[in-house]
Image (cartoon, grey):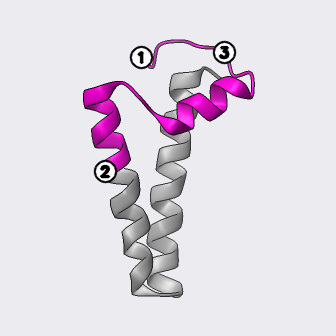
């Protein structure tokens, strides 16, 4: 799996997790969804993604998403 696909998979998993936590634990977990969305938006403009930096250090090979 490439770095780009790893980041997309991680972001999707975090959104699904936050929706589940919002439904079953507390409505305040909706802020996790907001945080993930804002992070995706800022990374589209700046090119910096903290998750990509972590995955890169873990040895995930770089690539293109599609």
Does the magenta run of residues contain 54? yes
Q: Quadrant of residue 6?
A: top right
Instruction: Give the vertical position of 7 relative to 28 (above or below).
Output: above
Task: State the residue position of label 1.
Answer: 66
- Quadrant in the picture for the C terminus: top left
Q: CA distance from mark 3 to mark 1?
A: 15 Å
Q: Where is mark 3, residue-wise? A: 61
Mark-to-mark CA distance, 1 and 2: 22 Å
Disc 1 packing (10 Å; few <14; some 14–19; many ≥20): few
User: Which residue is under mark 2?
Assistant: 38
Residue that lies at the very extreme toward the right in this rendered image: 58
Q: SS for tag 1? A: loop
Nearer-N-terminus badge (2/3): 2
Task: Determine the secondary structure under disc 2.
Answer: helix
Q: Residue furthest top?
A: 63
Residue 65 location in percent, x, y? Answer: 45, 19
Viewer-side residue, 12 vs 33: 33
Nearer the camera: disc 1 or disc 2: 2
**Magenta-tinted stretch:** 38-66
């Amino acid at each position: 799996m490439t770095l780009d696909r790893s980041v997309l998979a991680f972001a999707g998993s975090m959104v699904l997790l936050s929706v589940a936590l919002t439904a079953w634990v507390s409505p305040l977990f909706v802020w996790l969804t907001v945080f993930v969305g804002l992070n995706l938006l800022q990374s589209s403009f700046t090119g910096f993604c903290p998750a990509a930096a972590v995955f890169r250090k873990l040895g995930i090979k770089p690539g293109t998403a599609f």
